Amino acid sequence: MGDVHMGVEAEAETETINDHSSSDDGRKRVDIYPLSCYYFGSKEAIVFKDETLYDRINRMKSNYAAFGLRTSVEAVILVELFKHPHLLLLQVRNSFFKLPGGRLRPGESDIVGLKRKLSRKLSATEDGCETEWEVGECLGMWWRHDFETLMYPYLPHNAKKPKECTKLFLVRLPESRKFIVPKNMKLLAVPLRQVHENDKTYGPIISGVPQLLSKFSINIVDI
């Protein structure tokens, strides 16, 4: 089995969402499997389009002028480690953290685009022909009101022309899978309790994921 980095404490192109059984309290159940069920390897590094924040803002402005609102889709993927749920995160340049995903192409649907991005970041081949991704519910949406660094989980009534919308989707894993990650990224398994409200380390979107998952019953499957 390949290596995976851990946190500090440790297609048919259909857009239907599979129904999952509920727990006794009525919450939808999410089955998660041990980290040891998964294989982790590496592939060629990907080229980053932005070297600095200034570059990123300029590219956002250019894309907005050409295509309008930028829509990004990101995946919330859970595994079990030490009997606790862990969130899979990508670490870029040994610095900031992000959920797997990325920007949609013009006219591309949320589900198709997220599957494409997951295959590019986490599969051996970019076309994803060897990997099926079960994209489920949209957990939440974040908005960038202007060309700035901060995003908010709401859109004020006076924000007539938002610049970016980021949607978070729950992605359920099968019992086994190969994760093949670009060499210039690390795939981390971080405890949910460590992420919770820790926006200083993980940013506001990632640190808010545990709250978004509170409507689900997380079921750890013993293998």
Image (tube, rainbow, N blue to C red):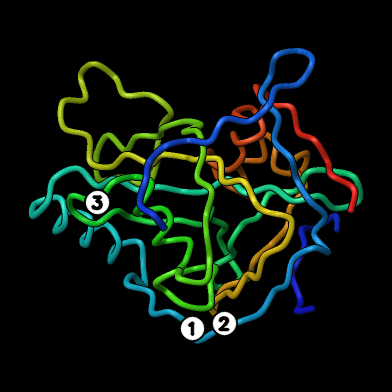
User: Residue 34: image x %, image y %?
Assistant: 82, 55
Secondary structure category for the residue under label 3: loop
Q: Quadrant of residue 206?
A: top right
Q: Which quarter of the rendered picture does the N terminus lie within?
A: bottom right
Helix, strand or loop status at disc 2: loop
Q: Residue at x 49, y 40 (%)?
A: 169
Total tally of numbered discs in the picture: 3
CB under 8 Å between discs 1 and 2: yes
- Secondary structure under tag 1 reads loop
Front one among 53 and 156? 156
Residue 108, which numbered label?
3
Q: Nearer the viewer, residue 19 or 112?
A: 19
What's the residue at 70%, 14% (across, down)? 26
- In 3D space, how far apart are the residues under numbered discs 1 and 2 (Cα atoms)? 5 Å
Q: Earlier in the sequence, mark 2 or mark 3?
A: 3
Instruction: Tell me how far mark 3 sits from mark 1, CA to CA.
Output: 25 Å
Name which residue type carries label 3: Glu
Q: Does 63 sit above or below residue 142?
A: below
Horizontal side of 96 relative to 67 (left or right) equals: right
Which amino acid type is shown beneath numbered disc 2?
Lys
Q: Which residue does the image show at 47% across and 40% down from the upper left?
A: 168
- Residue 45: which disc? 1
Observer-side mark, 3 or 1, equals: 3
Residue at 22% from the left image edge and 34% from the top image edge: 162
From the viewer's perspective, is the residue at label 2 or at label 3 nearer?
3
Question: Residues at badges 3 and 1 in contact (C-beta under 8 Å)?
Answer: no
Where is mark 2, residue-wise? 183
Q: Is residue 17 above or below residue 114?
A: above
> x, y percentage for residue 175?
74, 56
Which callout, 3 or 1, points at the residue further toward the start of the chain?
A: 1
- Under mark 1, the amino acid is Ala
